[in-house]
Structure formats: C-alpha cells, structure tokens
Image (cartoon, rainbow, N blue to C red):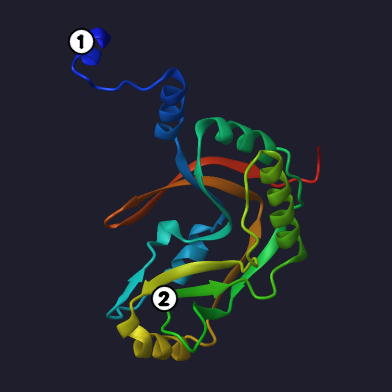
Amino acid sequence: MSVSRLQATGIRLPSPAEYKTLSASMSTQRLFIALTLPEAVRGVLASTATPIPGVNWTRPEQLHVTLRFLGDVSADQQKAVLKRLATVRVEPFILPVEGLGVFPPPNRPPSVLWIGVGSGHPRLFQLRQRLDDALIAAGLQLDVRLFHPHVTLGRATEDAAKSVAHWLYVHREFSAPPFRVESFELYSSELHPSGASHTLIRSFPLTSKL
C-alpha cells in the first residue's frame, strides 16, 4: 500500500526522526563483557551441578566471569564501544577459581549459586577499571555497584533453600583449576523461555603494548 493511501486511512506514519529512532531500537543488542572460561575449567565446574529440585544449572558452555553488564546498546553505540574496548591494555594474568557462595545474603533464600575467584588478581581489578574508563568514553552510563567477580553456576527458587545449604556444605572445599586470562570478550545475550543464549561478538587480547 502506498504512503498516500495509508495516510488516507487515518494511519499516522512516523516522522523521519521517529524512523531513525525506530531503526536504532530494532538493531539494539543486550551486551555484556566477560572472561571466557577454558573448557577444562567449565568441565570441572559442571561436575558440581548435581540434580537439586528448584535449581536450574547454567549450561557448561555459558559459564563465564562477568566483567561488566552493559544492557541494551544501539548499533551506533556498539561501534563506539568496540573502538574503545580495542584500546584497553592490561597484561595477561592467572586467575583462581574458588570459594562457593550464594546471593543474596544468608538471612534470605538463595537465588544465585556461584563460585568466586578467591582474592582475585590485581590485574583483574585493573582490567575492570580500564573497561569502565573505555565504556564511559564511548558514552555509556554505568552503574556503580561493587564489583564482585564470580561465575554463576545456577539459579534457585525459594523452596530450594535447604537443599542449597546442603550443596554448599558438601562442596565447601571445592575449587577449579586456575587459568591464564589472555583476553576478554564482548557478548550479546538473548532471553528465551528456556533461558538466555549468548553469542560472541568480539574477543580482545590482553597486552601491555600500544
């Protein structure tokens, strides 16, 4: 149907500015930056995923350490983000994988089961700061919540509290092999009824060289 015939029906057509906004929103992606775990580490972590009623375990291929969740990012913003992330410089480092825990605090039913990175590594926090600097320079607004690096192992319903407490006790000494961090990755995330699916957009190698 032609534009003139559409207008004759009383249908309001978007203005050029609205078309531009609509086009940008259609190309928006939900993004996050993460450290991708080696397959061997993912396999060890997956061994903790014993059947527990009320717990939905993260699929092994999606286990990662989130460095920064960006939320919905337009195509134009994404170009700026990619350009700025490529300027981040941090030397590779070794990261431990240890210390099971849950969110929220113990006085409330757990909803997230996770494993931490021990005391981390100074370069991990340096990387996070330099990522934030790059993202702010790209025009993104970031939340100021405390950075708590971890791998989300699973999510639980309220009625799983006792079973989760038992799981924490059984695995209280659990740790996975440390791994060498040589890059960080930008992913897109799509939400589905069966859970989120992650797609790699670009990997950025760590280096101290300009």
Question: Looking at the image, which is closer to me, 143 or 111?
Answer: 143
Judge whether 60 appears above or below 10 on screen.
below
| Direction from residue 148 to residue 54 in the image, left or right | left
Residue for point 69% across, 56% down: 128
Label tally: 2
Instruction: Identify the residue position indicated by label 2 in the image.
Output: 111
- On-image quarter of the C terminus: top right
Which disc, if any, is residue 142?
none
Q: Nearer the viewer, mark 2 or mark 1?
A: 1
Tell me where residue 171 appears, x and y as whole percent.
47, 85
Q: Does the residue at mark 2 contact the one at mark 1 (Cβ under 8 Å)?
A: no
Tell me where residue 158 appears, x and y as whole percent.
34, 81
* Neighbours of disc 2 within 10 Å: few (<14), some (14-19), many (20+): many
Quadrant for residue 85, please give it: top right
Residue for point 55% across, 30% down: 76
Instruction: Identify the residue position indicated by label 1 in the image.
Output: 5
Residue for point 41% across, 76% down: 111
Q: CA distance from mark 2 to mark 1?
A: 54 Å
* Neighbours of disc 1 within 10 Å: few (<14), some (14-19), many (20+): few
Tell me where residue 101 appears, x and y as whole percent.
52, 80
| Direction from residue 107 to residue 88 in the image, left or right | right
Question: Looking at the image, which is closer to me, 50 or 116?
Answer: 116
Residue type, numbered disc 2: Ser
Judge whether 68 appears above or below 24 on screen.
below
Residue type, numbered disc 1: Arg
Upstream in sequence: badge 2 or badge 1: 1
| Direction from residue 81 to residue 110 in the image, left or right | left
Judge whether 138 appears above or below 43 on screen.
above
Residue for point 43% across, 25% down: 18
As helix, strand or loop, the secondary structure at mark 1 comes to helix
